[in-house]
Amino acid sequence: AQSVTQPDIHITVSEGASLELRCNYSYGATPYLFWYVQSPGQGLQLLLKYFSGDTLVQGIKGFEAEFKRSQSSFNLRKPSVHWSDAAEYFCAVGAGTGGFKTIFGAGTRLFVKA
Amino acid sequence: NAGVTQTPKFRVLKTGQSMTLLCAQDMNHEYMYWYRQDPGMGLRLIHYSVGEGTTAKGEVPDGYNVSRLKKQNFLLGLESAAPSQTSVYFCASSPGVSAGLVKGNEQFFGPGTRLTVL
């Protein structure tokens, strides 16, 4: 069965430091992969997505993610974190025909300290 | 464009009461979804729809019903609310496969409805 694992429930980084959020997926075919961000009291917003091609994908707000098939991973990175990046981040895999059924990980909450 | 809107934003029910959550989108999207979000569990798909007049069960459909009589609206009903249905409910929509694989699967979310069942 398809699944998404985000090993870190929460992470704290200092403002200006680099960030990497981990995501591992289980899916039988080539996956459609997403990262979403949720600010407090808000809905989710798409950061970036991977369907095929270049395994390093760029997203909004300076985020990027790298697809590694051999490790079944799709880790999210940002070189320098800003206080406004504090939020909850969800990795997701698209399942079903065309990937329209999306399975979400449990989320990683990011805290940014000054 | 309002995007995806949800009504109401908050609701408190007593066990056994019924209610309907309304989701509306103005992006002409084919696909619509209802999720629930619980602490530590991410989002779980309740029901979804791939077009007007069609619905399907997701991961956690029990206790919920849905209808999609119009393309822009997707209703989630609770016939007899239970405390286990206390959650935050999110509606989302996506263009669907007809928009191509690159764009078709991007989901747009509403702001959520916080439901408490006493």
Image: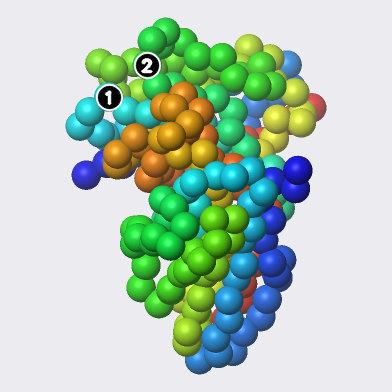
Q: Which mark is residue B1?
A: none
Residue situated furthest top in the rendering: A54
Relative placement, left or right, of A93 versus A62 is: left
Residue A8 seen: no
Q: Are marks 1 and 2 in contact (CB under 8 Å)?
A: yes
- Chain under callout 2: A
Secondary structure under tag 2 reads loop
Q: Residues within 10 Å of mark 2 (few under 14, many from 20)?
A: some
* Residue A66 horizontal/vertical position (percent): 44, 15
Q: Which residue is mark 1?
A: A30
Q: Please, is residue A91 above or below residue B65 in the view?
A: above
Q: Of the residues shown, which amino acid type is indicated by label 2?
A: Ser
Q: Please, is residue A52 above or below residue B39 in the view?
A: above
Q: Residue at x 58, y 76 (%)?
A: B20
* Residue A41 horizontal/vertical position (percent): 71, 53
Relative placement, left or right, of A7 versus B4 is: left
Q: Which residue is mark 2?
A: A52
Q: Please, is residue B53 above or below residue B63 in the view?
A: above
* Residue B82 horizontal/vertical position (percent): 48, 83
Q: Please, is residue B45 above or below residue A44 in the view?
A: below
Residue A3 seen: yes
Q: Residue at x 35, y 73 (%)?
A: B62
**Picture quadrant where residue B13 is located:** bottom right
How many numbered tags mark residues here? 2
**Picture quadrant where residue A86 is located:** top right
Q: Which residue is nearer to you in this view: A20 or A51?
A: A51
Q: Quadrant of the N terminus of chain A?
A: top left
Q: Residue at x 76, y 31 (%)?
A: A84
